[in-house]
């Protein structure tokens, strides 16, 4: 406990009309409230703020940049606020802070006061001279000793703010760091343990956008308070919109709050083309998530929602370049042929989501089966059916130490902020892994562990739904696939009958707008009956060959004039000409894997429903041997 510091930490030392009493502001952001309370009630004097640390902060009825917000928060307590940015150098929030720091550093022997004053000239002061002297200094080996001298001075409380802390003390194997990097890491770590710093009215705040990029010796130190700055939630965005666009009405304000999910406040500011320098009467903090409408009480304002939504997609993809794809599915289940039992199962899930029956929505859905069976296409159709936003997780793997974990953390933060979203992971065994040999230095295990932690959060049920597709579920971490993470596991197989293949063919004709109304089911069904083992992708490929022949005028033998519509003769030639590229033993193994992963027997085709566990184990082993897998 530090009760003697509560007054100095919370109240202004003297009246100052330019100071805002942020520590007691009703709208103080939760991350700063958490830092304040831990600082006042424990011996913690060093904090790491990670995540959304470069965003606008709305507090005390004003908008701030993060540096000016921290200045305004600590200045009323009488602390000297000093910033260190490795890209900008050492600087002070206020001129008087520089003056007080200059006196301390001169007394500590770092500078000569007369020399500094001489450099300042007749119009400059001691603080201005110091700012000019150290303001261009970016090297940690020079700056950190200066900061340490300030931190160990008991009669001058200091708040040290280190921006881009991961560049000052980066995470890496110690042997791979330079001596300067190792020294910087050791210095900052020592500050968290040094009684001279801990028991003084001082504190150190390290800012980093990605926690995994900061040296673990610091971020995993029990004496360091690690606090996440999240992306703005519904209430945060609504308050910011009401603050910067005071003429918004309730309906438009609520719509804008929804379509800006996942964006930083600075992104919203850019989209709305509204400056943040103004001071307005800030909207009150509502008591619940459902009260965002109460923040907008004014006449309607015409804000183009479609344009805002389009810009949101652009900004999200730019923020997570190459990591996610914001999807706008162009088809629903009406464009999916066959797979009737799968569509019924997923429509039931969609109904629960739309009705708000969150307890009946699975935490995740795993789609397993051989390639070409329509897993990805159905996942996208489901995203359209359930009405949730959808993103596709792309390649999160990076070539350097820590990059993969950093990428995953960035994506999970975006997902958390978006909420009410379907996260589609194609080829999950490659994208995520989990059964590797360990030659990746443990990256797979750390990625899977973090993903399992995120997927197990029951507060996500009904809001964040993972859909993963794979044809090799045996390569996924076993614990990742369990109930509570993937509650529903749906097996996919090649079409089991000519009727199923016909349904797929008709759906694909509709999808590609093939002019084939003249072809009757009776004509084409005998063609499809013998095609056992053909996937939906094979049927699609043959159809496209037939359509290309028809459109380019390559007529079947015996046909002299192109008919007004495609006829079955084009399909007959295309299916005879098409050569499916398949490894039969591997496909057989994938089918038996799909059987073994199914959540229940009713999802299986008739011929697999009565298979016993012993028989399934035997068939898996046999097919694995035939596929020559180890």
Image (cartoon, rainbow, N blue to C red):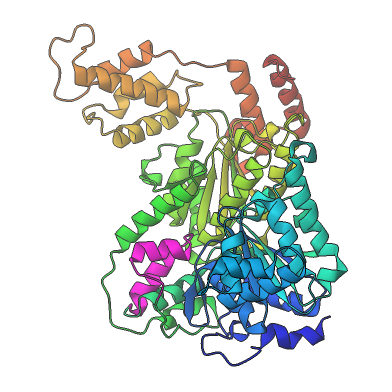
262 part of magenta stretch: yes
Q: Position of residue 590 (x, y in %)?
A: 62, 27
Image height of 41 relative to 538, above or below: below
Q: Decide whether the magenta segment is chiefly helix, strand or loop.
A: helix
Q: Is residue 41 above or below residue 182?
A: below
Q: Nearer the viewer, residue 51 or 608?
A: 51
Can residue 132 be seen here? The reply is yes
Q: Quadrant of the N terminus?
A: bottom right
Question: In the displayed structure, does residue 98 sit left or right of residue 39?
Answer: left
Q: Which residue is pictured at 75% across the width and 85% down the height?
A: 6
Give the camera-side residue of 611 and 18: 18
Q: Which quadrant: the C terminus?
A: top right
Determine the image quadrant of residue 480: top right
The residue at the far bottom in this view is 15
Span colored in magenta = 248-277
Image location of residue 30, percent across then percent down: 62, 74
Residue at 50% of width from left, 48% of height from top?
Answer: 320
> Relative to residue 582, is residue 554 drawn left or right?
left
Furthest residue toward top: 557
Residue at the spot x=32%, y=19% of the render? Answer: 545
Left or right of 326, for residue 165:
right
């Amino acid at each position: 406990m530090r009760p003697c510091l509560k007054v100095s930490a919370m109240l202004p030392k003297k009246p100052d009309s330019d100071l805002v009493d942020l520590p007691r502001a009703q709208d103080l952001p939760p991350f700063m409230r958490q830092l304040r309370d831990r600082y006042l009630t424990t011996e913690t004097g060093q904090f790491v703020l990670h995540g959304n640390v470069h965003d606008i902060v709305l507090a005390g009825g004003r908008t701030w940049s993060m540096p000016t917000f921290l200045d305004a928060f600590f200045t009323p307590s009488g602390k000297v606020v000093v910033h260190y940015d490795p890209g900008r150098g050492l600087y002070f929030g206020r001129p008087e802070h520089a003056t007080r720091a200059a006196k301390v550093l001169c007394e500590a022997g770092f500078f000569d006061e007369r020399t500094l004053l001489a450099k300042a000239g007749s119009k400059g002061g001691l603080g201005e001279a110091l700012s000019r002297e150290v303001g261009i200094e970016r090297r940690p080996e020079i700056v950190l000793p200066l900061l340490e001298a300030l931190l160990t001075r008991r009669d001058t409380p200091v708040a040290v703010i280190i921006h881009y802390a991961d560049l000052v003390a980066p995470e890496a194997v110690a042997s791979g760091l330079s001596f300067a990097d190792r020294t910087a890491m050791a210095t900052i770590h020592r500050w968290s343990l040094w009684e001279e710093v801990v028991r003084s009215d001082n504190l150190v705040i390290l800012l980093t956008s990605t926690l995994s990029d900061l040296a673990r010796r610091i971020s995993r130190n029990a004496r360091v308070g690690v606090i996440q700055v999240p992306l703005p939630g519904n209430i945060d965005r609504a308050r910011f919109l009401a603050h910067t666009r005071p003429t918004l009405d309730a309906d438009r304000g609520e719509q804008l709050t929804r379509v800006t999910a996942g964006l930083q406040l600075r992104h919203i500011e850019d989209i709305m083309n509204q400056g943040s320098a103004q001071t307005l009467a800030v909207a009150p903090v509502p008591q619940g998530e459902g009260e965002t409408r109460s923040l907008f009480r004014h006449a309607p304002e015409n804000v183009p929602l479609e344009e805002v939504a389009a810009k949101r997609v652009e900004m999200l993809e730019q923020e997570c370049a190459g990591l996610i794809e914001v999807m706008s599915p162009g088809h629903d289940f009406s464009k999916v042929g066959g797979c009737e039992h799968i569509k019924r199962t997923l429509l039931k899930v969609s109904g629960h989501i739309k009705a708000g029956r969150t307890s009946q929505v699975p935490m995740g859905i795993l789609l397993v089966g051989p390639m070409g069976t329509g897993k990805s296409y159905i996942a996208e159709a489901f995203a359209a059916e359930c009405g949730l936003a959808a993103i596709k997780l792309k390649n999160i793997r990076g070539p350097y130490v820590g990059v993969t974990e950093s990428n995953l953390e960035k994506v999970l933060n975006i997902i958390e902020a978006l909420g009410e979203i379907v996260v589609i992971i194609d080829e999950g065994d490659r994208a995520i892994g989990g059964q590797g040999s360990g030659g990746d230095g443990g990256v797979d295990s750390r990625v899977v562990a973090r993903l399992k932690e995120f997927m197990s959060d029951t507060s996500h049920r009904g809001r964040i739904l993972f859909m993963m597709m794979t044809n090799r579920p045996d390569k996924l971490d076993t614990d990742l696939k369990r109930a509570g993470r993937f509650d529903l596991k749906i097996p996919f197989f090649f079409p089991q009958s000519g009727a199923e293949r016909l349904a797929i063919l008709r759906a694909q004709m509709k999808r590609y707008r093939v002019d084939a109304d003249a072809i009757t089911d009776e004509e084409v069904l005998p063609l499809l009956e013998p095609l056992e083992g053909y996937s939906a992708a094979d049927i699609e490929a043959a159809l496209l060959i037939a359509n290309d022949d028809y459109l380019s005028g390559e007529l079947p033998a015996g046909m002299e004039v192109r008919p007004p519509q495609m006829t079955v003769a084009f399909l007959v030639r295309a299916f005879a000409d098409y050569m499916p590229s398949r490894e039969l033993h591997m496909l057989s193994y994938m089918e038996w894997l799909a059987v073994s992963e199914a959540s229940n027997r009713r999802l299986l085709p008739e011929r697999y429903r009565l298979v016993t566990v012993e028989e399934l184990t035997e068939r898996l082993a046999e097919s694995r041997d035939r596929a020559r897998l180890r």
